[in-house]
Every structure is written in structure tokens, then in C-alpha cells.
Amino acid sequence: MKIDYIQRTARKTLAIVVNEKSQVIVKAPKYMSNEEILRFIKSKQKWIDTKVSEIQRQNQIHNDLFQYRKILICGKKYDILHDKCAKDVSLRNGYIVMKPQISAKKEVNRLEKFLKNCCIEIVGQRLKYFSNIMQLEPKEMRLINAKHRWGTCDSERVISFNWRLVMMPPSIIDYVVVHELAHIMEMNHSNAFWAIVAAVLPNVKETRAVLKKSNFVLQLFREIPTTE
């Protein structure tokens, strides 16, 4: 029985979460007995094993991204090419080209800055495009570094996107952009909200299914490799 953490809070129900590192976290009411918690865990063991295996398999498939051997842009993986004559990080001839760095931390920081600039350009263009189609005008676009969110829209019409969105395929980028624009009209996830989204993107259900399988991207650029 694999359990990494048991978190006791003021919640009223039990829940099991398998995080991006395949750690199993049980969230339990503060005063619930250990016996009851263990019974619940045992009843969910098959689901836990399946979820842990799924995340471990996914992390292994994308280990090259977690180790910064490849960089993801618009759903495509790019190798990094070091060029001592390069000044800024750039996308050139199918490679991410950059000057060799003294440390892994400096290299990752430069790559992150490059991707944020790409996000401003690429996602910004899609936001402008769909704003015109939907006749909705956001007040401002911002970048965020959220661990579990792709985007947000507040009551002031400020739309924020996780900068990692630029790593996703174009169809996912468009979905998140339209999703947040729709919140300008409906600050909820009611039927009216989904009707707005579906009017622009008819294949929204299929796209959402793909997005749910891509949460590993939200964990990229969180840690620096331990080896230089």
C-alpha cells in the first residue's frame, strides 16, 4: 500500500490525490480514525496503482523535457544547439540555439525567459484573433506561474495565462484563450458559458480531453537538474 502523505484538515470527506511526482496524498478530516482512513485507501488501491503507473509512464516518456534536453513549443519538441557565437536564445533551423552557459541554472533561466517571450507573442496573437471574432475586449493580458491553472479571467477583464501554455499544441492554446475570453461574459462554468465556447470551438470536448492528459507540462521548469 503506497501512501506518501496523509494531510489532516477541517475537511469533511476523504480524498486521494496522486501528484505530478506520482506521490500519493490522502486528504482526511482532522478527527477521522486511522482505521477508517486505511479502509478507504484499501478500497481505492486499484485506482491508486493505475494512476501512479500512468504518471510514472508519462514522466518517463517526457524525461527529455524534464531534464531540459529538449524544449517544447506549440506541441513540438526541439533539441538545444549550443553555439558560442549566439547572443540571444532563438529558434533557428529546427533547433533552440543558445550560447553555452556556465551552469544548468543559468541555462534554464535563459530558456524560461525565451519561452515567456514566445508566449507573449504567440498567445497574444491568438488572444487578439479570438477577441475580434467573439467581439470581446480584455483589459490586459498577463503571464502567471501557476502550478495547476492554464489561465484565469477576473471581473476587471484581466486575462492571465500560464506562460507554459506556449508549449501546448495550437488547438489547446486556442481552447484556453477562448475559454478565458468566454469568462468575460460568464464568470462561471454554466451551460451558458460552455455554449459560448462551443460556438467558437465545436470540438471543445475532445480538446478538453487532450488538455487533461497534458498536465505534466504545468510541472516543467519547476526544478533545476542536479548535474551540471
Image (cartoon, rainbow, N blue to C red):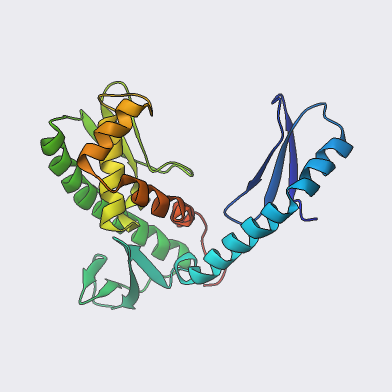
Residue 29's place in the image compared with 66, above or below, is above
* Residue drawn at point x = 22 percent, y = 32 percent: 140
* In-image side of 216 versus 72 (left or right): right
Residue 62's place in the image compared with 175, above or below, is below
* In-image side of 133 versus 78 (left or right): left
Q: Looking at the picture, tell me which residue is in the foreground, 217 or 193.
A: 193
Residue 58's place in the image compared with 185, above or below, is below
Q: Looking at the picture, tell me which residue is in the foreground, 19 or 83.
A: 19
Q: Looking at the picture, tell me which residue is in the foreground, 107 or 169.
A: 169
Q: Position of residue 174 (x, y in %)?
A: 25, 48
Q: Quadrant of residue 221?
A: bottom left
* Residue drawn at point x = 32 percent, y = 63 percent: 75
Residue 17's place in the image compared with 11, above or below, is below
* Residue drawn at point x = 54 percent, y = 65 percent: 59
* In-image side of 219 versus 14 (left or right): left
Quadrant occupied by the N terminus: bottom right
Q: Quadrant of residue 84?
A: bottom left
In the rendered image, the residue lying farthest to the top is 155
Q: Position of residue 79 (x, y in %)?
A: 34, 75
Q: Position of residue 109 (x, y in %)?
A: 39, 58
Q: Position of residue 32 (x, y in %)?
A: 82, 29
* Residue drawn at point x = 57 percent, y = 54 percent: 20
Label tally: 0
* In-image side of 179 versus 28 (left or right): left
